[in-house]
Image: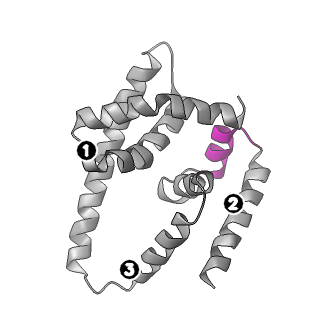
Amino acid sequence: MKRTDVWDIVMEYMPVAAQALKRAGCPVHQLEEMTHDVGIPAILRCLERYDATKAAFSTYLWHAVRRAWWRETKRKLLQIEVEQCYDDNPERERRDMVQYIMEGLDTHDRLLLELRFWHGFTYSELAATLKMPRASLHRYLTDLLKRCRDAIT
């Protein structure tokens, strides 16, 4: 499968992920954000781990997205509680800078960084998901991080 094929599949199953989030209780005003933050990584992981003998892919994806949404919701609630305890957080400036840089990237680059650093995908997992050599992925990520560092200075 080529990289474009993977992204075509991701886009094909985005409505399933959105519907799963909606039925799980995700607020409507957060649906698009959660579909991006939770749905895309869940679809990519499901593509790697799917076993056709157990269930249809959409059913497997449905449950995976709901579980991922619950984990993300718990994580965000915990993060809010921690931030309320430490309002004078020196990390806030750094987070704002990272958010500013991420907004300036295209969708593919932003998703790549999110999967690598926020969702914990290893180089091997990313390379397998994107169907590209691990060394090429490493060079691409290195160049991407260099561009991000240059944007800071």
Q: Earlier in the sequence, mark 2 or mark 1?
A: 1
| Quadrant (top left/top right/bottom left/bottom right) for the C terminus | bottom right
**What segment is highlighted magenta in the picture?**
122-132
Q: From the image, state whether disc 2 or disc 1 is nearer to you.
A: 1
Queried whether the magenta region covers residue 49, the answer comes back as no
In the depicted structure, whether residue 67 falls above or below residue 151: above
Give me the C-alpha separation between circle 1 and circle 3: 27 Å
Give me the C-alpha separation between circle 2 and circle 3: 25 Å
Give the residue pinned by disc 3.
Answer: 92
x 72%, y 32%: residue: 2
Task: Answer left or right for 55 relative to 82.
Answer: right
Queried whether the magenta region covers residue 129, the answer comes back as yes
Question: Residue 12 at what x, y percent from top left?
Answer: 51, 28
Which corner quadrant of the image does residue 91 belong to? bottom left
Question: Residue 32 at what x, y percent from top left?
Answer: 37, 46
Give the residue pinned by disc 2.
Answer: 141
In the depicted structure, whether residue 76 falls above or below residue 72: below
Q: Residues within 10 Å of mark 2 (few under 14, many from 20)?
A: some
Q: Are marks 2 and 3 in contact (CB under 8 Å)?
A: no
Q: SS at mark 2?
A: helix
x 77%, y 44%: residue: 133
Residue type beneath disc 3: Arg
Q: From the image, state whether disc 1 or disc 3 is nearer to you.
A: 1
Question: Residue 20 at what x, y percent from top left?
Answer: 32, 32
Task: Answer left or right for 150 relative to 28.
Answer: right
Q: Residues within 10 Å of mark 3 (few under 14, many from 20)?
A: few
Would you say the magenta stretch is mainly helix, strand or loop?
A: helix
The image's mark for residue 28 is 1
Residue type beneath disc 2: Leu
